[in-house]
Amino acid sequence: MDTEIELKFLVSDAVIPLIPSLITQFAKTVNNKPSRSLQNAYYDTPSRELRALDIGFRTRCADSQCEQTIKLAGEVVGGLHQRPEYNLPIDSNRPNLMAFDASIWPHGMQVSAISKNLYPIFSTNFIRRTWLIETESGAKIEVVLDKGEIAAAGKIEIISELEIELVEGSRSELFALADKLVSQNCIRLGLYSKAARGYRLADENPLMPSKSIGFVKLPNSASQEKALIEAMNFGIRFVQKHEQCYFDKPSLKTLKRVTDGISLIRHTFWLYDDIVSKESTDHLRTELKWLLSELAWVENAIQLKTYTSKRHAFYKKINAAPALAQVIGDLKELQPSIDDINALFHSARYNRLLLSLTTWLIDKHWRKDWGQVELQAAEQSVASIAKRLFNKDWKNLHELLPKEKMLDVIAYLNLRTQLENSLLSGNCLGSLFDKEERLEFRLPWLDISHGIYELSTLEYLKQLCAGQEDEQLAKIQSWLEQKSEYLVSAMEQSRLASFDIEPYWQ
């Protein structure tokens, strides 16, 4: 058995000619292997039993020689792929699942039954260029460039990937080479394997953006350190998933999911500050703040698009004031284009941030300055910490929003950061508690959070109308004031209803 430790990149045609020189600059020695044409077929049952177990099974033929490969469930963290792999030679491109050692299979897997129902799901065919390099410290890294296509059900998807795999030596050398590669601005980290892409193509199941950020999955027995690791991995994958969704089908709502993932990662540093020192994350926090600032326009852009949609109730009102419609049109023109966002996701700074987060997580950098206090805190049950934290948040919200006090627009806008942080804590830790009770409790607060987003846009529109001597704009401003009041009234109803719902963690 081999265990792959590799980083995957998606590369543009513009950067491919630069790869040999980049490798040569980095390595002490470079062994350039001959190019090979690889024909691969991936197998599964009609009910996708191997896929359900996160097992990949393929045959590969090159130069009249064929082999079959099993890749078992592994771990993907920020682009770093680690999976157990087993290879056996075969006489033709027909697979034989029963030839593998029986001890490798997950407990309870019906190997014989699966073997009888296997058929080819999709194929990947590509030209592979390979370089084996040795670094100054003696580490050996295999660099592989694959150019070709995935084919399934009469559809084709392009392969243009660079993989770097650690053969021998320190993992830090792998990340050092990765840093060198992403400095080119035309290379970005890849999350999904050829197999994952092939299954989506074959099953006509395209990658779709999530409707919400969801919840980090945690077992009840999880320690605080385990919960930290799961939340960070969840956040990094969430960002990368929606980055890819944006490339597949650009949309503002998909970009909002990217900012949600970034916010969750930042919140995780704060949430687990018992074991994560601020000093160990200073650089990461700075870069996350930068990335959020690059995408800060997205939320207003979503609201402006909504309000100027012909299907929206505000459309006629806004278009009745040509001056306001013109200002909104000008603002839309100033928004970054799809090409600008593509450039951001290909930028060295963005990809270095993802690499830095991955390195921090894989190498457990938070442990570097630990003493006995941090060690004990790390081993504590996260369930008990969650209850204490939620009780504190709930008490703070009660103090900020006393039941007997009526709130206005300003009060709700000032509440935004506190409420978002409370909801993010629920995203990180809420899976420890009953799903139905959690949903019932969070629903009014999610309504209030969405209301705050809308209030902030109404305030933005009011500012656009203010200070201009235009009768139509004055009427629009008065109308926006009424809309804000109606919205606050609805939010007040949600807030008052929330006091009657039992907290789900108690």
Image: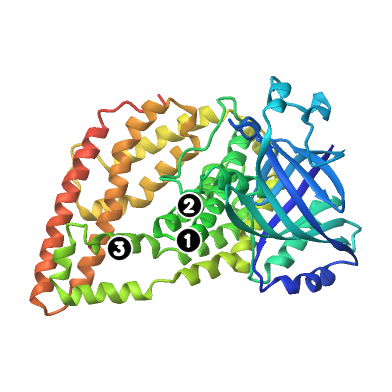
Instruction: Provide the residue designation for mark 1.
Output: 292
- Mark 2 crowd level (few <14, some 14–19, many ≥20, 10 Å Cα): some
Whole-percent x, y for residue 340 in the image: 49, 71
Residue contact between numbered discs 1 and 2, judged by CB atoms under 8 Å:
yes
- Is any part of residue 67 visible from this angle? yes
Instruction: Provide the residue designation for mark 3.
Output: 305
Asked whether 264 or 70 is in front, the reply is: 70
Element type at mark 1: helix
Q: Tag 2: residue type?
A: Ser
Whole-percent x, y for residue 159 in the image: 66, 58
Instruction: Provide the residue designation for mark 2.
Output: 263
State the residue at coordinates (34%, 51%). Answer: 416
Q: Earlier in the sequence, mark 3 or mark 1?
A: 1
Quadrant location, the N terminus: top right
Q: Quadrant of residue 297?
A: bottom left
Residue 102, placed above or below residue 283: above
Asked whether 9 or 278 is in front, the reply is: 9
State the residue at coordinates (63%, 30%). Answer: 49
Residue contact between numbered discs 3 and 1, judged by CB atoms under 8 Å:
no
